[in-house]
Amino acid sequence: MTLDWKRIHNVFNAVHLRLRLWEVRWEAHMKAAKKFQADIPSRDEQTLTYLMDVLEVRSNADFLTKAVALFRWAVEERKKGCKIFTMSPLGEQRELVMPELERIAPELDLPFRSVGWHVDELENFAELATKKQPQPTEHLIRAMARK
């Protein structure tokens, strides 16, 4: 039995090229992928597990990708000035309001509403507005730090 060295060399080169191509693709994938890690409370972990089961998502990365896609859509809709609603089968509507989404909504002309103030109300407002402001509580400081 004689060995065809030229054929063996060609097969070796083909395998080597395929391995190199796989390596280049893997490196590109790893450079493109961003690592994301988060510590979440057990209650949120249970919610995450439930949502992944309901949506039949098998990995945290896939779930995050889908969540980002949903948020991207919501951001684009609010940027256009659209509101996001849910409608029940009976036609009842509820609007999604999130401070994060409302901040990116375009400035819209809000309807003008005149409030008829009584003298007592104006005096009370003036007193509150000119009073020395109290120091923030620890609860408020913690809440603002989480922002």
Image (cartoon, rainbow, N blue to C red):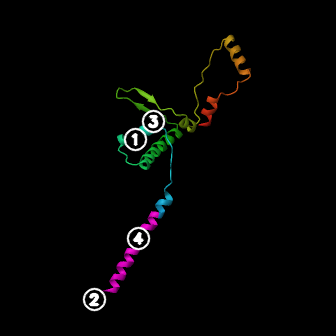
Residues at discs 1 and 2 in contact (Cβ within 8 Å)? no
Is 64 displayed left or right of 110 in the figure? left
Q: What residue did someone put label 4 on?
A: 19
Which image quarter is the N terminus in?
bottom left
Label 2 element class: loop
Is 132 located above or below residue 47 in the figure? above
Q: Residue at x 44, y 32 (%)?
A: 85
CA–CA distance in space, label 4 to label 1: 37 Å
Q: Which portion, as a residue range, is magenta?
A: 1-26
CA–CA distance in space, label 2 to label 4: 28 Å
Asked if residue 147 shows in the view, the reply is no
Q: Residues within 10 Å of mark 4 (few under 14, many from 20)?
A: few
**Residue 2: mark in rendering:** 2
Q: What residue did someone put label 1 on?
A: 49
Asked if residue 35 shows in the view, the reply is yes
Is 2 located above or below residue 41 in the figure? below
CA–CA distance in space, label 3 to label 1: 10 Å
Task: Find out whether residue 20 is within the magenta segment.
Answer: yes
Q: Amino acid at mark 3?
A: Arg
**Residue 13: mark in rendering:** none
Residue 103: quarter of image: top right
